[in-house]
Image: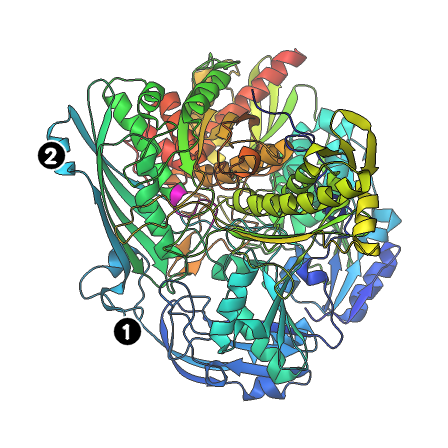
């Protein structure tokens, strides 16, 4: 039996929710500063071209224009992540259609837009590379002259003796899968406002997921110290991993503001969001899988070729995740992965919900079904037989402290079996099938020996209200709500009495940011530990006031009382008033920097790098029209091991959202390029799921009480998306017997697979 | 966008006077759902916008002299929600209900759907199948034109909305035994342009098709009428599934959809038309059977 809590696990109104639905929340574009200018960026129309000349004089002369910048006006300091190859503006050449060439700040957005037309750029076209396969060919043109072979990064990871194990398998199957280029397409376009302060400090307002990471990256691009910069985070209208890292516009607005000596705002337009954001890393994944007749999964050999785009952001780390994580979903005896990440003349790819793990799950979870079917086995039984379990040490060194994978599979399978529709309609054109896919993920992910925790500062006010400072952005996922609940639970006060502060890097404690599904687990733990310290201070003072021993006291619903003698007590507010307003001088404040008990992976990528691994199984029922190939996802049963649900409504919200985004990717989302130019750069023709396309979703919360997470909690942010594409692919095969190996699973692909005599489009 | 003036006339004469005053540099706007985006992206030009949505003589619709008269101010929502239209012209009602989103349908007008001259325009496809005519007013006088004759190339209307006003669309009232149907195939359920769409209007007697009109989009630079499929419809028994399939097959063959990286390759879209036309004929058969 799990302990019942007063606040944890209970339905609670989302912090900031009413401000959003009533329009009071302040997003970046709602911020107007006195004297503020508006920026626009001139982007390359070409995928690959040498810059012969940039003449900005006419633009600078346009009335209302206050600053015009191109590469010659800016520091030439490389920035980026593992492979820092980005510059503020393209210098000698442009490397993708969308590359930043120049920027203007003007009195109005319209003037800025007009000024862009007056910038004269001469290009000499260069041969362009649109796929990593082309880019890795010998003699291919180079995207970066100092990056031979266009190779950004490669990994070889091997555990056990894969070749010997294949030789001993009853079956060895091989298949190739491909995932499409998709964009996070959050509701609020990304942007920033920059203002220089009198002491040569810089303030940046930006709705970013990792404020402190942003501060250090902006500092690096500008050649400043991080502490000279303040990053403030307004309300964020969705991010999904697409707003973890800075973009070129961050240093650009700072430099425009400096040049113009006025604050400058820049917000991406929707077409820019499509053409120049950071889409999911597309990858071709070839899997060879060895199994025994009884369904035991033995060994796996994987080859990955992935598209980095023109500049390197998170793709190296994403390909590493892609190369490792699914190996730990089942009890493989041996695995080997060879991965290659190549530069191309396309939009730089980076983080998006799943961070590489979604691509490899599409491949592996499709593969499990393919193999099980070929071996005449039930794919769900094969999963159950091989699922990792609590207490396992996986072949990459993960310590599985809590694991509800088996329970998730069983519950999802049972839920989808209930109320199934007929497998075929009487007229024979509509067929239905079910499919299931599993997933594992992390709650935080330590890199090397770096900090991977979170910090929290809590402080009581004189009226008994609590202020909680943290540094993990709430981009709509509910971080503030969960933190308020954890603090309230720990301190015995109402969550409404906790004020979760907005992020300001001058005030907020150091944190890495909202990614890796880590906030509930690590920031929640920091808030828990800080609250625990303040609780001790609170009870100690209360004991003096009540003339009782601190260990005999408890606190509930804002009242401190002697256990067993409930009538003798004092309100939290009264104790706070005594602490602060009298000569008691108790701080009622705590600052905790928490680092989870994990080890970053070693140079061979072995290590227990997350304190809480998460597990899920999602089952779907689909309907396929055999004449047209059209698919409808009818129902989804999504079972997630969340350790312990802090905010069950928040978890359900994440599941609905993950299903929507995952179904969109599974069925239609795909950035289509012709000659390096994006053909669907608007919401009109980039097809996402709408409310009317949503299947019926049954969220199933599985609780395994993680030993490390706060109150046993683990992450849920990314997991709900990950199993959707393979679950849909598996259900389609169940319905009509065709296997689609490349995303998205469009009606057209199904039609041509069902009618192999018809010639499909050249792919 | 470089709009110098935004004018709101209250009756047709005033509106024509304004168009004349701007001498071809003004342009009519009703819902503006396409025009404003086109102006913003530089795909359309105008120096003045003349907003017809406050003109009472262009409001509403009614049945008069064996015709449905839909005046130019009528929105997709008004047309799709009208019970009488849903009953007599289900093809038009359904087509209007398929366009965009509720927000778009609340302001976008049926007349705009025609003047915008897009081959995929759902309502226009239905109007062509229904044999609708457009009533056009200019300083030169009044003229009536079949909707299908208003196309002058992709996105080019023969109605010059810098000089003339489409005041109403006139749709004949179906006779006894006449049925009409509309359908579309799109990747998702709403807020989506069709991969293909089609509308049919059939004259039937005793379960047999006497004649029929078929309009399909977007397979040409205008709502497209497959002549051979229409000819093949004559004399077909609605119970004869094989014959209905054959009409669908011919219609698919006659269509010439482009290969599109977003909408699908030509062969696939042809297949969709084949299935869509047959399905719509089956719907029509079910309707006539109900009425009989």
Q: Residue at x 41, y 35 (%)?
A: A440
Can you give x and y, in whole percent of width and height, for residue B196 in the image? 51, 38
Q: Is residue B109 visible?
A: no
Q: Earlier in the sequence, mark 2 or mark 1?
A: 1
- Of the numbered discs in the image, which one, if any, rests on residue B117? none
- Tell me the element at label 1: loop
Residue A556 vs residue A272: left or right? Answer: right
Residue A661 vs residue A205: left or right? Answer: left
**Pointer 1 chain:** A
Contact flag, marks 2 and 1 (Cβ < 8 Å): no
Which of the pair B128/A463 is nearer the observer? Answer: A463
Residue bounds of the magenta highlight? A352-357
Q: Residue at x 33, y 59 (%)?
A: A130
Q: Quadrant of the N terminus of chain B?
A: bottom right
Q: CA distance from mark 2 to mark 1?
A: 41 Å
Can you give x and y, in whole percent of width and height, for residue A628 in the image? 43, 30
Which of the pair A268/B175 is nearer the observer? Answer: A268
Can you give x and y, in whole percent of width and height, for residue A739 in the image? 32, 30
Few, some or many C-alpha atoms within 10 Å of disc 1 (few <14, some 14-19, many ≥20)?
few
Which of the pair B148/A471 is nearer the observer? Answer: A471
Can you give x and y, in whole percent of width and height, for residue A485 in the image? 67, 39
Looking at the image, residue A315 lies above or below residue B88: below
| Residue identified by numbered label 1 | A145
- Tell me the element at label 2: helix
| Residue identified by numbered label 2 | A164
Looking at the image, residue A286 lies above or below residue A733: below
Looking at the image, residue A71 lies above or below residue A403: below
Based on the displayed image, in which of its 4 quarters is residue B25 positioned? bottom right
């Amino acid at each position: 039996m799990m302990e019942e809590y007063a606040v944890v696990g209970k339905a609670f109104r989302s912090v900031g929710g009413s401000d959003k639905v009533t329009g009071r929340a302040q997003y970046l574009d709602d911020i107007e500063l006195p004297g503020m200018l508006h920026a626009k960026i001139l982007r390359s129309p070409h995928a690959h071209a040498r810059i012969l000349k940039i003449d900005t004089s006419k633009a600078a002369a346009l009335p209302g224009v206050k600053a015009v910048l191109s590469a010659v006006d800016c520091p030439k300091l490389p920035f980026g992540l593992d492979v820092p190859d980005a510059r503020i503006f393209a210098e000698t050449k442009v490397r993708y259609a969308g590359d930043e060439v120049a920027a203007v700040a003007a009195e109005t957005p319209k003037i800025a837009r007009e000024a862009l037309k007056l910038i004269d750029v001469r290009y000499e076209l260069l041969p362009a590379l649109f796929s990593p396969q082309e880019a890795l060919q010998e003699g291919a043109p180079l995207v970066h002259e100092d990056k031979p072979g266009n190779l950004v990064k490669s990994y070889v990871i091997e555990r056990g003796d894969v070749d010997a194990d294949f030789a001993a398998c009853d079956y060895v199957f091989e298949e190739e899968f491909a995932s499409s280029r998709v964009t996070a397409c959050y509701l609020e376009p990304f942007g920033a406002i920059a203002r220089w302060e009198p002491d040569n400090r810089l303030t940046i307002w930006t709705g970013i997921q990792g404020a402190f990471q942003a501060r250090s990256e902006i500092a690096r691009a500008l050649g400043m110290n991080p502490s000279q910069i303040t990053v403030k985070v307004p309300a964020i209208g969705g991010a999904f991993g697409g707003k973890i890292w800075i973009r070129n516009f961050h240093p650009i607005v700072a430099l425009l503001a400096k040049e113009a000596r006025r604050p400058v705002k820049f917000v991406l337009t929707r077409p820019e969001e499509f053409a120049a954001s950071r889409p999911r890393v597309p990858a071709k994944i070839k899997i060879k899988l060895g199994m025994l007749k009884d369904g035991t999964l033995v060994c796996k050999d994987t080859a990955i070729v992935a598209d980095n785009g023109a500049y390197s952001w998170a793709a190296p780390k994403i390909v590493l995740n892609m190369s490792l994580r699914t190996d730990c979903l089942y009890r493989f005896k041996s695995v080997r992965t060879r991965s290659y990440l190549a530069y191309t003349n396309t939009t730089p790819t980076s983080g998006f919900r799943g961070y590489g793990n979604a691509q490899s799950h599409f491949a592996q979870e499709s593969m499990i079904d393919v193999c099980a079917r070929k071996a005449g086995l039930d794919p769900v039984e094969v999963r159950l037989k091989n699922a990792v379990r609590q207490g396992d040490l996986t072949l990459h060194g993960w310590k599985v402290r809590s694991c509800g994978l088996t329970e998730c599979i069983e519950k999802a399978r049972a839920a989808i079996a209930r109320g199934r529709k007929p497998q075929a309609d009487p007229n024979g054109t509509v067929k239905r099938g079910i499919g299931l896919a599993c997933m594992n993920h992390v709650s935080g992910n330590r890199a090397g020996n770096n900090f991977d925790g979170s910090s929290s500062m809590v402080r009581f006010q004189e009226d008994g209200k609590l202020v909680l400072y943290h540094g993990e952005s709430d981009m709509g996922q509910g971080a503030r709500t969960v933190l308020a609940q954890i603090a309230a639970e720990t301190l015995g006060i109402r969550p409404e009495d906790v004020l979760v502060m907005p992020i300001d890097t001058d005030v907020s404690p150091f944190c890495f940011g909202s990614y890796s599904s880590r906030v509930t687990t690590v920031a929640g733990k920091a808030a828990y530990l800080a609250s625990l310290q303040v609780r001790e201070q609170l009870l100690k003072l209360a004991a003096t006031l009540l003339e009782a021993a601190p260990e005999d006291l408890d606190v509930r619903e804002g009242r401190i009382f002697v256990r067993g003698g409930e009538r003798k007590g004092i309100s939290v507010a009264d104790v706070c008033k005594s602490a602060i307003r009298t000569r008691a001088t108790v701080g009622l404040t705590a600052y905790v920097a928490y680092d989870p008990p994990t080890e970053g992976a070693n140079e061979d990528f072995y290590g227990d790098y997350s304190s809480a691994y998460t597990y899920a199984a999602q089952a779907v029922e689909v309907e396929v029209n055999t004449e047209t190939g059209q698919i409808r996802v009818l129902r989804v049963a999504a079972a997630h091991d969340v350790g312990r649900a802090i905010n069950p409504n928040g978890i359900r919200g994440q599941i609905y959202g993950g299903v929507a985004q995952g179904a969109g990717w599974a069925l239609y989302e795909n950035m289509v390029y012709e000659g390096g130019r994006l053909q669907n750069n608007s919401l009109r023709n980039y097809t996402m799921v709408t409310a009317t396309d949503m299947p019926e979703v049954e969220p199933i919360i599985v609780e395994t009480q993680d030993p490390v997470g706060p109150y046993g909690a683990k992450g849920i942010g990314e997991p709900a998306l990950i199993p959707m594409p393979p679950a849909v692919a598996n259900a389609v095969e169940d319905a009509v017997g065709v296997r689609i190996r490349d995303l998205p699973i469009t009606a057209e692909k199904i039609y041509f697979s069902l009618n192999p005599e018809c010639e499909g489009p050249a792919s | 966008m470089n709009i110098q003036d935004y004018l709101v006339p209250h009756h047709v004469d005033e509106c024509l006077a304004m168009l004349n005053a701007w001498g071809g540099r003004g342009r009519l706007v009703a819902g503006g759902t396409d025009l404003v985006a086109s102006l913003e992206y530089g795909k359309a030009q105008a120096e003045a916008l003349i907003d017809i949505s406050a003109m009472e003589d262009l409001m509403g619709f009614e049945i008069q002299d064996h015709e449905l008269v839909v005046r130019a101010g009528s929105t997709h929502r008004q047309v799709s929600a009208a019970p009488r239209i849903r009953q007599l012209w289900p093809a038009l009602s359904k087509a209007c209900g398929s366009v965009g989103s509720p927000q778009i349908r609340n302001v976008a007008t049926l007349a705009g759907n025609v003047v915008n001259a897009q081959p995929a325009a759902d309502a226009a496809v239905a109007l062509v199948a229904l044999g609708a005519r457009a009533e056009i007013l200019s300083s030169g006088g009044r003229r009536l034109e079949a909707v299908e004759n208003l196309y002058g190339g992709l996105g080019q209307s023969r109605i010059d909305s810098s000089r003339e006003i489409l005041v109403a669309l006139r749709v004949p009232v179906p006779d006894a035994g006449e049925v009409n149907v509309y359908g579309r195939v799109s990747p998702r359920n709403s807020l989506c342009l069709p991969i293909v769409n089609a509308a049919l209007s059939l004259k039937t007697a005793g379960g047999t098709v006497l004649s029929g009109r078929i309009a399909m989009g977007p397979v040409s630079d205008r709502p497209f009428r497959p002549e051979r499929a229409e000819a093949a419809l004559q004399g077909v028994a609605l119970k004869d599934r094989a014959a209905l399939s054959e009409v669908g097959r011919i219609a698919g063959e006659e269509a010439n959809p482009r290969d599109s990286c977003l909408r699908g390759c030509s062969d696939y879209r042809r297949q969709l038309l084949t299935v869509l036309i047959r399905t719509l004929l089956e719907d029509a058969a079910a309707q006539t059977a109900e009425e009989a």
